[in-house]
Image (tube, grey):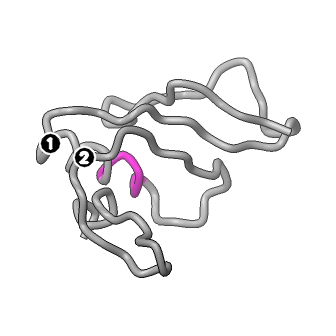
Amino acid sequence: MSGVLAQMQLGPSGSSRKQGASSWLLVHLIQLLPNGYYDRMLTDHNKQFCNMPKRYGLALKEQIVEQVPLSAVDVKLDGIIHA
């Protein structure tokens, strides 16, 4: 399922259509999906397309901290956009 999600984009009328590898991913930094969902999705995407999209997180300024503990399976973000 994650490989399909990474390949879907909206068509002209809002319908979805399958495409190639994603070049970027924008995610919210509030946990709404199960632990490790984006890490697994990105790992699957990398295996399927042999590339990793640019990864940016959306956050509120109250969520910004100096350091976040990472595990060996965590995929790092390229940046954070905050308001």
Provide the residue designation for mark 1.
49
Q: Residue at x 59, y 66 (%)?
A: 32
Q: Majority secondary structure of the magenta segment?
A: helix
Q: Quadrant of the C terminus?
A: top right
Provide the residue designation for mark 2.
21
Count residues near mark 2 (Cα–Cα under 10 Å), then give few for <14, some for 14-19, many for 20+. some
Q: Position of residue 47 (x, y in %)?
A: 13, 42
Q: Position of residue 68 (x, y in %)?
A: 61, 27
For the residue pair 24 and 37, the one nearer the viewer reads as 24
For the residue pair 81 and 65, the one nearer the viewer reads as 81
16 left or right of 1 in image: right
Q: Report the number of numbered marks.
A: 2
Q: Residue at x 45, y 28 (%)?
A: 76
Magenta residues span 36-40
- Find residue 4 and report its image quarter: bottom left
User: What amino acid type is highlighted by mark number 1?
Assistant: Phe
